[in-house]
Image: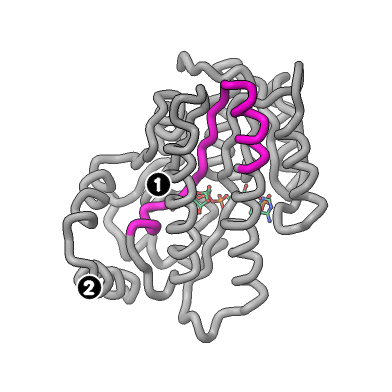
């Protein structure tokens, strides 16, 4: 069992994929966890498997839903939250000029605006307490542009940048802020983002397991790392991207997305 320091947690996007895997790891480690997503039935199924799970069904693109989650994060005393995981997010694959503009609004609202609001709520509660952990789920897509997944990559570039800034801002306060940057991970993401063709376009070694990604993120935020990039393939890719001329990275990214 993992010896994490968290005494309580809140995970958004807990109804499937990486978020659900995090909740299972936290439950095994005995960490009481508030689970957030829109599909309340899925959250209730999770809660039925462990006494320590509190269900908070909310749509984070909705003003009231977001405010309710921010309020829960700000609670003090017995209800204080030690670890906040901003994991809810989605992407939209396709030619930018032809995508549904309302869907892109929701993507920006969830991946950027909601994450910012909940990060503010988390640090507002944690810094005065001089204790806490914030894990923002970004992506390796944040390290370079991604033609045909352009808005998604741009939202994740924001998440990594914001999170690294906050990591430095709270240095020495007892609060730790980490960006989790997974590569391709088998979850409902592919179905939701219209990237199911990735399953056949990318080799098996490129695929990560949601359980492993979830554990790596929780381990790295507990260690106080700024960035968590699970898997050797993606650690190498992130390092190589930093050393490659920007124009070349852009062209290669365009070729990969064209597959
Ligand atoms: N899978 C990958 O290849 C991959 C790679 C890099 C980064 N990521 C990132 O990892 C995170 C988790 O994604 P995943 O792969 O686990 O995908 P997933 O299985 O589709 O999970 C997404 C979660 O977000 C929740 N969510 C979506 N819209 C929401 C809304 N408006 N309000 C509240 N919750 C909402 C979903 O729950 P409901 O539908 O029940 O609301 C679900 O629990 C995302 O930020 C994603 O960008 C994924």
Whether the residue carrying mark 1 lies under 8 Å from ligand 1 is answered with yes
Q: Is residue 35 above or below residue 99?
A: above
Mark 2 touches mark 1? (CB < 8 Å)? no
Q: Secondary structure at mark 1?
A: loop
Q: For the residue labelled by badge 2, is the local secondary structure a helix, a strand or a loop? A: helix
Label 1 belongs to which residue?
181
- Residue at the outermost bottom position: 97
Query: Can residue 1 be seen at all in this image of the molecule?
Result: no
* 2 or 1: mark nearer the eye: 2
Extreme residue in the right direction = 64
Q: Is residue 154 magenta?
A: no
In the rendering, at what x and y percent does residue 213 appear? 42, 38
Rendered residue at 46%/17% (across/down): 2
Pointer 2 residue: 247
Foreground pick, 120 / 198: 120
Q: Is 220 on the left or on the right of 40, as rendered?
A: left
Residues packed near mark 1 inside 10 Å, few (<14), some (14 to 19) or many (20 plus)? many
Q: Residue at x 33, y 62 (%)?
A: 144
Residue 30 image offset from top left, x and y in percent: 60, 16
Q: Is residue 69 left or right of residue 182?
A: right
Give the vertical position of 116 relative to 28 (above or below): below
Image: magenta residue range: 120-143
* Quarter of the image where one finds residue 256: bottom left
Residue 236 visible in the picture: yes
Q: Where's residue 152, x and y in %?
A: 48, 64
Task: Tell me which label, 2 or 1, sits earlier in the chain.
Answer: 1
Residue density around tag 2, few if under 14, some if 14–19, many if 20 or more, within 10 Å: few
Residue plotted at (17% across, 56% down): 243
Instruction: Work out which quarter of the rendered image holds the C terminus and state it.
Output: bottom left
At 22% from the left and 49% from the top, the residue drawn is 239
Q: Which is more toward the observer, 185 or 246?
A: 246
Q: Is residue 42 left or right of residue 89?
A: right
């Amino acid at each position: 069992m993992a010896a994490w320091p968290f005494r309580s947690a809140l995970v958004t996007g807990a109804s499937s994929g990486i978020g659900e895997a995090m909740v299972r790891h936290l439950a095994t480690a005995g960490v009481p966890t508030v689970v957030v997503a829109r599909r309340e039935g899925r959250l209730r199924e999770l809660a039925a498997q462990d006494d320590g799970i509190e269900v908070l069904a909310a749509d984070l693109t909705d003003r009231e839903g977001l405010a309710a989650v921010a309020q829960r994060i700000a609670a003090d005393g017995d209800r204080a939250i030690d670890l906040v995981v901003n994991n809810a997010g989605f992407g939209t694959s396709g030619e930018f000029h032809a995508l549904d503009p309302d869907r892109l609004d929701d993507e920006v609202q969830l991946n950027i605006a909601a994450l910012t609001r909940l990060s503010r709520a988390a640090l507002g509660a944690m810094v005065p307490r001089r204790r806490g952990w914030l894990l923002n789920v970004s992506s390796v897509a944040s390290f370079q542009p991604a033609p045909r997944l352009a808005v998604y990559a741009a939202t994740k570039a924001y998440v990594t940048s914001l999170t690294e800034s906050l990591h430095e801002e709270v240095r020495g306060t007892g609060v730790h802020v980490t960006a989790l940057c997974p590569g391709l991970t088998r979850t409902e993401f592919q179905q939701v983002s219209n990237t199911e063709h990735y399953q056949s376009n990318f080799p098996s070694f490129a695929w990560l397991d949601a359980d492993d990604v979830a554990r790596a993120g929780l381990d790295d935020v507990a260690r106080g790392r700024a960035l968590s990039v699970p898997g050797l393939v993606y650690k190498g890719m992130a390092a190589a991207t930093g050393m490659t001329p920007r124009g070349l990275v852009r062209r290669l990214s365009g070729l990969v997305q064209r597959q």
